[in-house]
Image (cartoon, rainbow, N blue to C red):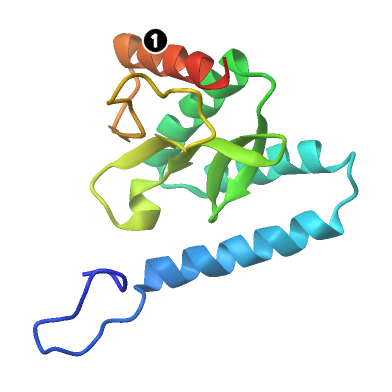
Amino acid sequence: MSANTGTTGGGAAEGFSEEERAAMKARAAELRKEAERGRGAKAAAGELDVLAKIAEMDPADRAVAERVHAIVTANAPELTPKLWYGQPAYARKGKVVCFFRSGQADKERYSTFGFTPEANLDDGGLWPTSFAVTGLGGAAREELAALVRRAVG
């Protein structure tokens, strides 16, 4: 169980997992780095940070993350790449709209691509917030592109 959902079988409260602690430390470092950068350098530096993070990924996650990056930047050029909790994300006016999470980094069997409440996806009583991603073939690529366009529309 995660730290926010309860206790272990023995009754002792569990702390944050190693992955959760690493993500929090990464986010704190990202905020410090952003504060140190000049206003004009943030966008270019953010893109380099994202590309460097993608290059570090396990080959399977790297292939998906590279495709996600290409889809997002082609379909929503107004979004700025940046790291968010140590993973690639895309922001508008500093607020993350969508993000990629490496399954390998999270010790999960699949990676995820998700949207924050900043995305313009609200539609009736049900809309997408996160998807499992193991590959991005033709139909999945088109669906993701359409969602990204809608999220920034």
- Quarter where residue 69 is shown: top right
Q: Residue 116 at x, y = what percent?
A: 47, 38
Front residue of this view, candidates 118 and 110: 118
What's the amino acid at mark 1? Glu
User: Which residue sits at x=35%, y=39%?
Assistant: 112
Q: Residue 82 at x, y = what percent?
A: 65, 42
Which quadrant holds the C terminus?
Answer: top right
Left/right placement of residue 113 relative to residue 7 reads: right
Vertical arrangement, residue 142 with respect to residue 13, above or below: above
User: Which residue sits at x=46%, y=14%?
Assistant: 145
Which quadrant holds the N terminus?
Answer: bottom left
Q: Residue 107 at x, y = what percent?
A: 30, 57
What residue is disc 1 on? 142
Q: Secondary structure at mark 1?
A: helix
User: Which residue sits at x=49%, y=38%?
Assistant: 99
Vertical arrangement, residue 1 with respect to residue 120, above or below: below
- Quarter where residue 5 is shown: bottom left
Q: Is residue 81 visible?
A: yes
Q: Residue 133 at x, y = what percent?
A: 31, 32
Q: Residues within 10 Å of mark 1 (few under 14, many from 20)?
A: few
Front residue of this view, candidates 137 and 93: 93
Q: Is residue 51 visible?
A: no
User: Which residue sits at x=26%, y=52%?
Assistant: 108
Vertical arrangement, residue 16 with respect to residue 94, above or below: below
Q: Residue furthest left?
A: 9
- Quarter where residue 28 is shown: bottom right
Left/right placement of residue 47 relative to residue 98 reads: right
